[in-house]
Amino acid sequence: MTPLSHLTSTPGAHATRLGAQLLPDGRGTRFRLWSTTTTLAHVRVDGTAHAMEALGHGTFEVILPVGAGARYMFVLDGADRPDPYARFLPDGVHGEAEVIDFGAYGWQHTDWRGIALRDCVFYELHVGTFTPQGTYRAAQEQLPYLKELGVTAVQLMPVAAFPGQRGWGYDGAALYAPFAPYGRPEDLMAFVDAAHGLGLGVLLDVVYNHFGPDGNYLKAYSPTYFTDRFQSAWGEGLDYAEPHMRRLITGNARMWLGDYGFDGLRLDATATMQDDSDVHILKELAQEVHHLGGTHLLLAEDHRNEPMLVTDYGLDGIWVDDFHHEVRVTLTDEHEGYYRGFSGSAPELAQVITRGWKYEGQFWNVEGEEHQRGKPADALEAPSFVYCIQNHDQIGNRATGDRLHHDPQVTPQEYRGASTLLLTLPMTPLLFQGQEWAAGTPFLFFSDHHGELGHMVSEGRRKEFAYFSSFAGESVPDPQAETTFEASKLDWNERDSGEHAKTLTLYRTLTRLRREDPVLCQRSRRPLSAGSAGDVLWVRTRMDSGERLLLWNVGKQDAVLEALDVARPANVILHSEVGLTETLPRPGMLGPGEAAIFGGGAP
């Protein structure tokens, strides 16, 4: 094999095109790496080693007459080093990379232009546990079900390559390579394409705040990707001031949105993305993403309640913990861990809904932290608040992966009441897989680390929960056991019976009401008000097109509506235990956990 002539450019231009890139017109593949510690670099392609030319500034390159499907490994000063910019790692994060032709997949729905945040009903899913098969193809087969459910945007938990055969994906090691056990890159493209064909957006959860403890080779190429200026609970701090690290992140976002057609990204733990550059990495990400054309969304997972993520940095929305926490504490009276910062009750829920989040500068003294938390969110409109009553963290970070409705204190009526609140607020709702039928399966923390690392993960999980009163350390499922992963897979057979079917019917009704009701379809905080009357939460929306009032009884006794000091429209529109209705099951009464919506006319 004879190398073809190489291309040269400035050092900065190399950074976003590291790895293996097919050249146009079948002229071969350019292999390029950047390293501050390497003297001699080679690339071994399909078993044959080829010297790479040093272009200066740490860049090495060679062009070879090979095409898509070729397997390769970089060799730095005689040591094999997987490509951290690999577009596919079929044998895992420690193996050879495969050259990928991103132009080979034939997109069917090229007229898709994205989805506005105001139109989103998110459905978060984990590819490995969403279906028995745990693949992109199997998940694709369920897309018509999600469309019929009333979901408008699917959010995939991270798919960037991580070690082992199973995991949540937040220990990603190779950001540019989709996780091979889920399927090939073209399978992921087909999933996104099929979703677009059904009118569904697709977002991807990405982790730009740390790398997993196994399988990331960036430091072997250059230690300057990382810094000790910042600390991370999950590993070395990323140095976004280093141009190559910065371009690794921004280039990765462009790849998912451009080559794979994703409609947006959910940015994991943005509070830990510390950057002392002149332009914060989050602001640059927002600028680059929004310049791509079409509609692309950026959502932050951020507990700080900082509106500047939207107003200054230009992100589109924020996952808001406060709403989830207040709902959970109201229903379960749980006060361990960060739930200590929440009181629970109808008045507390009303305050969160009215203000957008609870903490807007109040003192936070929980889990060893003492500081003021949050700022007022008056500048944010409703879609920028992503609300949920379940998500992967709030279930999976519990010792036994129990969902909200699994708590013995939470009745089916209370769960359906909470669901009614979630889906009729103008804020952006997020559902977690199986939530819509009150799935009986847990969502546990699981991983597949080998050797001592795997043992440390298992022991650490037990110790993490040893001091919680609700369970003993020995009852915590081993995250390394394959049975823990298998137990987290949805049981699709249960959704058509009993309380599961009743809950699923309500969810379908609620998403339809959210979409079609002339008042509930609005997405502004301005017509919204909330308050409480005893144990009854009320949420009112007044517009020119009408008025809607939601009442949710979060108490343990019947609520007599006539005794409430709340003006009520004449007509009943929906009851959480009946669905669309014109009369309450028990006239004038709202049972414990039940919710009802009243209006000036039928939807």
Image (spheres, helix red, strand yellow):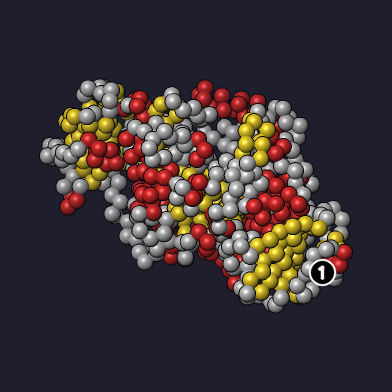
Comparing 29 with 270, the one in front is 270
Identify the image quadrant of residue 557.
bottom right
Comparing 58 with 412, the one in front is 58
Q: Quadrant of the N terminus?
A: top left
Q: Residue at x 71, y 72 (%)?
A: 599
Seen in the picture, residue 292 relative to 243 is either above or below; the reply is below
Query: Percent position (x, y) of residue 421?
Result: 69, 59
Numbered circles on residues, count: 1
Q: Residues within 10 Å of mark 1 (few under 14, many from 20)?
A: few
Left of 491 or right of it: where is 332?
right
Q: Residue at x 68, y 71 (%)?
A: 547
Left of 173 or right of it: where is 148?
right
Left of 189 or right of it: where is 533?
right
Q: Residue at x 73, y 49 (%)?
A: 348
Query: Percent position (x, y) of residue 570?
Result: 77, 75
Left of 119 or right of it: where is 222?
left
Please tell me whether mark 1 sits on a helix, a strand or a loop: loop
Query: Percent position (x, y) of residue 79?
Result: 29, 23
Query: Percent position (x, y) of residue 374?
Result: 60, 42
Q: Residue at x 79, y 54 (%)?
A: 554
The amino acid type of the residue labelled 1 equals Pro
User: Can the viewer see residue 509 in this picture?
Assistant: no
User: Can the viewer see residue 418 in this picture?
Assistant: yes
- The residue at which mark 1 appears reads as 585
